[in-house]
Image (cartoon, grey):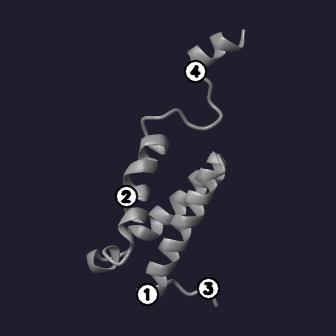
């Protein structure tokens, strides 16, 4: 029953997941946003170029650039504290 998504169904699911991630982002729920964004990215990478162009530009921009600014590899992983934050807690 769990068949892989293809064609328009895949495009629709990517859009849905990006919107869900954005709603978590707006609610300041970073953990859920990060998880949903990763699922959206995984599906996004399965799309062909013409399918990617079917995704509204505002969703593509948020997925690839805006959220990368906050959740990219250059940021500290969740649950980790830095020396600065440890100093502030004292």
Between 21 and 1, the one nearer to me in the picture: 21
Q: Is residue 68 above or below residue 17?
A: above
SS under mark 4: loop
Give the structural element (helix, strand or loop) at label 3: loop
Q: CA distance from mark 4 to mark 3?
A: 42 Å
Q: How many marks?
A: 4
Quick check: 59 left or right of 31? left
Cα–Cα span, label 3 and label 2: 29 Å
The earlier-in-sequence mark between 4 and 2 is 2
Indicate the quadrant where residue 59 lies. bottom left
4 and 3 marks in contact (CB < 8 Å): no
Of 72 and 16, nearer the camera is 16
Find residue 82 and name its label. Answer: 4
Mark 2 residue element: helix
Q: Position of residue 52 (x, y in %)?
A: 33, 73
- Residue with the mark numbered 3: 2
Q: Nearer the viewer, mark 1 or mark 4?
A: 1
Q: Where, quadrant-wise, is the N terminus in this rendering?
A: bottom right
For this orientation, the residue located farthest to the bottom is: 1
Query: x, y percentage for residue 73?
Result: 43, 40
First in residue order: circle 4 vs circle 3:
3
Dot 1 and dot 4 residues touching (CB under 8 Å): no
Q: Please tell me whether mark 1 or mark 3 is closer to you in this view.
A: 1
Give whichever of discs 1 and 3 has the lower sequence position: 3
Q: Residue at x 49, y 72 (%)?
A: 15
Q: Residues within 10 Å of mark 3 (few under 14, many from 20)?
A: few
Q: From the viewer's perspective, is residue 73 above or below residue 58? A: above
Q: Nearer the viewer, mark 4 or mark 3?
A: 4
Residue matched to label 2: 61
State the mark number for residue 8.
Answer: 1
Q: Nearer the viewer, mark 3 or mark 2?
A: 2
* Relative side of 50 to 22, left or right: left
């Amino acid at each position: 029953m769990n068949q892989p998504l293809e064609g328009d169904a895949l495009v629709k699911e990517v859009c849905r997941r990006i919107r869900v991630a954005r709603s978590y982002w707006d609610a300041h729920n970073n953990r859920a946003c990060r998880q949903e964004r990763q699922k959206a990215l995984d599906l996004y990478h399965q799309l062909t170029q013409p399918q990617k162009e079917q995704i509204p530009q505002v969703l593509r921009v948020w997925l690839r650039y805006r959220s990368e600014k906050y959740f990219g590899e250059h940021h500290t992983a969740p649950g980790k504290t830095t020396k600065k934050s440890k100093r502030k807690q004292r």
